[in-house]
Image (spheres, rainbow, N blue to C red):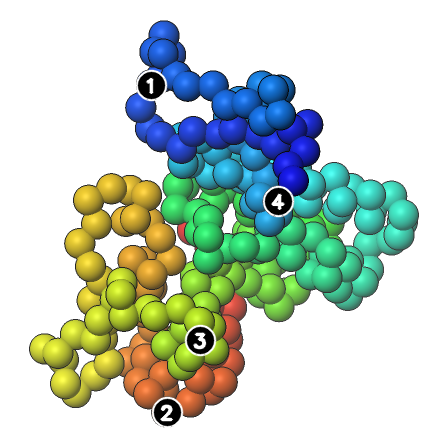
């Protein structure tokens, strides 16, 4: 396979500080390859320190600029129109590839929530501090982005359990045998944050947040479980 040196980059994935160390260089067709600290691959910005701060800034900036463009173009504050445009155009940017970079840091979650908070203030105007974000979401029939991420994580792993994706989830999670009366999961031990906060490792904790009858629905119907889970998280408040 022929490689174009101008389109190739080198990125070292490590949490170690390599400053001042002798590191190897890479050459293709006698041309040195640029070393980068972050690179977009399949729409997700991957950083050399294996953290997601750069990607969060990237998607929040894109979603914010797009929503600003929508407001200038549409020039109306009709909630139905703005919510539909946001859900169709902006929210997919904030949710794309979530199983790979599921956010867990409070600062990242707050940043990812900002664009939808602006939408809520525009659609349900009121003097500052008079209406809460939760109330505005309830009026608009929306879930917070954090609850959306939890639902999407549950949806992805549940589909893996039902064989919808070619991934074996039982390499990472297992059914807890000590709870025969109700469905519960356990996750494998994680030595690093890189694995600790993955979608599979966080699935048991997310699953335990659901009511008991909703958890047991996963045994009988995937579609019923996902539909009711989506409605459940829509009714939860953002703290």
Q: How packed is label 1: few (under 14 Cα within 10 Å), some, or many (20 or more)?
A: few
Q: For numbered disc 2, what is the local secondary structure?
A: loop
Query: Which quarter of the figure has residue 160?
Result: bottom left
Q: Nearer the viewer, mark 4 or mark 3?
A: 4
Q: Are marks 1 and 4 in contact (CB under 8 Å)?
A: no
Judge by depth and name the residue closer to the eye, 114 or 196: 196
Please name the residue that numbered disc 3 is placed on: 159
Q: Earlier in the sequence, mark 4 or mark 2?
A: 4
Q: Earlier in the sequence, mark 1 or mark 3?
A: 1
Q: Nearer the viewer, mark 4 or mark 2?
A: 4
Is residue 136 left or right of 187 when viewed as pictured?
Answer: right
| Distance (Cα) linking label 1 and label 2 | 49 Å
Q: For numbered disc 1, what is the local secondary structure?
A: loop
Q: Residue 40 at x, y = what percent? A: 59, 39
Please name the residue that numbered disc 2 is placed on: 220
Please name the residue that numbered disc 4 is placed on: 1
Q: Nearer the viewer, mark 1 or mark 4?
A: 4
Residue 17, labelled with which disc?
1
- Going by the picture, which residue comes out furthest to the bottom? 220
Q: Nearer the viewer, mark 2 or mark 3?
A: 3
Q: How packed is label 3: few (under 14 Cα within 10 Å), some, or many (20 or more)?
A: some
């Amino acid at each position: 396979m022929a490689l174009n040196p101008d389109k190739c980059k080198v990125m070292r994935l490590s949490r170690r500080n390599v400053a001042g160390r002798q590191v190897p260089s890479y050459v293709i067709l006698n041309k040195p390859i640029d070393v980068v600290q972050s690179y977009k691959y399949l729409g997700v910005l991957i950083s050399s320190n294996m953290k997601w701060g750069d990607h969060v800034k990237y998607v929040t900036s894109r979603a914010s600029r797009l929503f600003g463009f929508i407001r200038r173009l549409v020039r109306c504050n009709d909630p139905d129109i703005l919510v539909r445009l946001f859900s169709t155009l902006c929210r997919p940017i904030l949710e794309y590839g979530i199983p790979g970079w599921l956010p867990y840091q409070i600062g990242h979650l707050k940043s990812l929530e900002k664009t939808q908070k602006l939408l809520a203030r525009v659609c349900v105007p009121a003097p500052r501090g008079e209406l809460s974000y939760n109330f505005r979401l309830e009026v608009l029939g929306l879930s917070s982005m954090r609850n959306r991420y939890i639902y999407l994580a549950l949806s992805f792993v549940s589909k893996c359990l039902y064989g919808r994706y070619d991934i074996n989830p039982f390499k990472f999670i297992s059914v807890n045998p000590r709870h025969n009366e109700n469905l519960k999961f356990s996750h494998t031990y994680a030595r690093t944050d890189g694995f600790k906060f993955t979608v599979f490792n966080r699935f048991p904790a997310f699953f335990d947040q659901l009511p008991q009858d909703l958890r047991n629905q996963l045994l009988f119907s995937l579609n019923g479980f996902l539909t009711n889970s989506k409605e459940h998280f829509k009714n939860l408040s953002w703290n």
